[in-house]
Image (cartoon, rainbow, N blue to C red):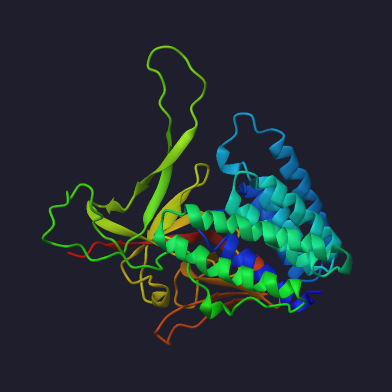
Amino acid sequence: MLDDEKATQWLDVTYTHWLFGCDYTSNLRKPTKEIVLQMRLAVDNESFAKAEQYMERLKSLSTRFSQNQAGASREYSYELAETLVECGCAAYRMGEKLTALQLFDDAAKKYTGKDHCRATALWMLGSVQWQFQTKLDDAIVSWESSYEIFCTLLKNCNRPENAAWYRYWVEKMRFALDGSITRDYQAPPPQEDWPLWDNLLKPPKPNMDETTSANHARQNPTADVFQAFSVYASIPAGGFSTSPHPLTWMEMEQVLIDGVPHNVFNLNQGRVVRLGDNEHYVAVKVKGDSMNKKKIDDGDYVLLRVQQVAENGDIVAAEKDGKFPDNEESTLKQFFRRDGKVYLEPQSSNVAHQPFIFTNENSLHICGVAIAVLKKQAN
């Protein structure tokens, strides 16, 4: 059987890197997302009874949302599936493996039509099944199914950088699956070896002798893009027809701030920064070098998704009751919660910057989470 340590490692890989480290964004509404954060915090603090209460609320809330989808945004069509994954991870961390097994199984079924996420949920399911002597054959089926889906995604992948990602993990999955069948259980490769979902292959430098139309050439091949505004199928200008469905998204490589072009750079993995239809965003100009290790430099703008909660590792805009030691009313720092305290940590090459530590979380107010940085286009 797969030991608990290796299973936990595989679950960490699939959750952080396969599910949310790729070109996929969360499908959770804001109320659901906030309950998820509270559930994670309860598990971190080993308040398992409270975590189970949050888990039941999540399952009930997501089920009710899914039953009331008429006219709802397609943005949340996989909210129930993602909620089940979150609850499965929480149940596993609390030692409730049978519950986790059922939740991952349900999540895989709910991800119908979203093959990458379905394959991820199946691999998570198999990681739990391997720990039960009576479910080893079930685990083989789950992992083999996940592997076959990734093989199909690799075969049909049009972007070479994403194909390279699938090619890497298909090889590791086959190796792990073959080893597990012979009871030689394999841990996932170390994180420093994981490929990034995007930018594995650098785009070729343009040939200045070619006469490619400037209207179709990327102006800055190293920049990322905003993805916003659904592009729908055609609609008749005369009579009525059924409601059109979105086919794709409008993408923008550049924005103007006071008439000055700025390029977009994602602060998360991938080159696409998706802007949710029902979320609010603001751009704020950065002053200082306290976050320059995150490529956020003095004079840049950060795009903030307005929200009042944050997860470990988020780059946040925060205010406190009273002023910070540098006499500023707000700050941009990386957020961490450890040992009952909240840390706002600089990520800077300037050692003069020190973290802010809060023992009373109520004195700190999250204003937003940074999702992209906007840099003035070089001349």
Residue at 46%, 61% in the rendered image: 163
In the orientation shown, which residue stands out farthest toward the right? 134
Q: Locate the C terminus by quadrant.
A: bottom left
**Point 74% across, 67% down: residue:** 127
Which residue is farthest left? 209
Query: In the rendered view of the protein, which quadrant contains the N terminus?
Result: bottom right
Q: Nearer the viewer, residue 292 or 25?
A: 25
From the viewer's side, name the closer residue of 307 and 324: 307
In the image shown, does 200 or 186 lie closer to the viewer? 186
Above or below, comparing residue 350 to residue 63 in the picture: below
Examine the rendering and report whether any part of residue 66 can be seen.
yes
Asked if residue 321 can be seen in this view, the reply is no
* x and y percentages locating residue 75 in the rendered image: 56, 42
* Left or right placement of residue 34 versus residue 56 in this view: left
Vertical placement of residue 147 versus 217, above or below: below
- Residue found farthest to the top: 239
| Residue 175 shown left or right of residue 322 in the figure | right
Residue shown at 69%/46% (left/top)? Answer: 110
Write down the quadrant of residue 223 in the picture. Answer: bottom left
Which x, y percent locates residue 363?
62, 67
State the image coordinates of residue 63 (x, y, percent, origin top left).
Answer: 75, 41
59 or 312, nearer to the observer = 59
Residue 377 placement: quadrant: bottom left
The image shows a total of numbered marks equal to 0
- Percent x, y of residue 53: 82, 55
Kindly indicate the quadrant of the structure image that contains residue 362.
Answer: bottom right
Query: Eyeballing the image, is 81 above or below 314?
Result: above
Position above or below: 80 against 99: above
